[in-house]
Image (cartoon, helix red, strand yellow):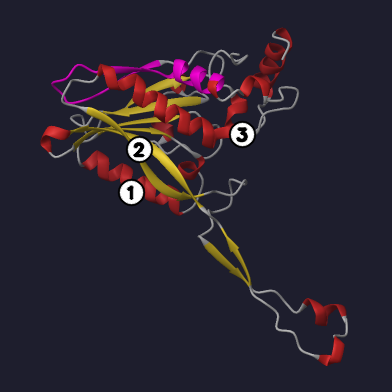
Amino acid sequence: MKSPFPGMDPYLEQHWLDVHASLIIYARDQLQPQLPGNLIARVEERLVVQPEDREDRSIYPDVRVVEESNKRAATGIALANEVDVAEPVELFYHEKATETLIRIVDPGTKNRLITVIEFLSLANKLPGPNRKTYREKQKELIYSRVNLVEIDLLRRGRRVFPLPSGSVPRKLRSTYQICTHRGWKPTSFEIHPAPLRRRLPVIAIPLRQKDKEVHLDLQSLLDQAYQNGRYGTSIDYSEPPEPPLAGADAEWAEELLKTRKR
């Protein structure tokens, strides 16, 4: 079953961990046969701390310590035999999650890094140490003349492309965006708009300057993730997405879902 939306389905943001992992694998598989014989696309992992639901909160560290007051004393409840019971310190453990990305490397030159492809996640876009770390790695890649392709299919959080958002022409500002940086053009960035109401684009993936670029069909990746994840039978389209759409986009989505009986 296909999504009722022509492009990015905003309801998929609620299931982004699964969708993100699927997009990475499908993108690797789509790129691999297009690459020159001496380049390889690899899926690599990094650990991140899961962000809180609210955007204005920082991501908590692995273990948070909270000291509680003596609840028994506060309520005036007498203990048997007047025994003092030690009040524990409550710990909240936040398990780290694995996040994946694609690296295209040249194994003939000790796996020299050629291109990095990122499908952005909330860990990259919400305040906290993960966004700071992502920004640092982003700068390292650009200074190292590595190609960087960042694909942002999330409405939540702050866009983290390596250029001020105000520098993007208004006509290119859209619900979703893709930013491509070619390593041999250190001050140049390419923006691909991806409006909510349109099919996701096919984008060019740069390799070495001498190589012919390869292509990534984002819509076909999303369609595959939607179908294989069986979201057509599990998403309740009678409820608003999270985060909700607003204004004309909300009206458009409501009419679209009515038309397609979803």
Q: Residue at 40% x, 28% y: name it.
A: 25
Quickly name the residue at label 2. 162
Q: Pick whichever, 121 or 57, lies toward us.
A: 121
Asked if residue 215 lies left or right of residue 248, the reply is left
Q: CA distance from mark 3 to mark 1?
A: 27 Å
Q: Amino acid at mark 2?
A: Pro
Asked if residue 80 lies left or right of residue 181, the reply is right
Q: Which mark is residue 136?
A: 1
For disc 1, the neighbor class at 10 Å (few under 14, some 14 to 19, many from 20) is few
Q: Amino acid at mark 3?
A: Gln
Q: Residue at 86% x, 77% y: name it.
A: 75
Instruction: Give the mark count.
Output: 3
Quickly name the residue at label 3. 14
Asked if residue 219 lies left or right of residue 2, the reply is left
Give x and y (percent) for residue 112. Answer: 17, 37
Q: CA distance from mark 2 to mark 3?
A: 26 Å
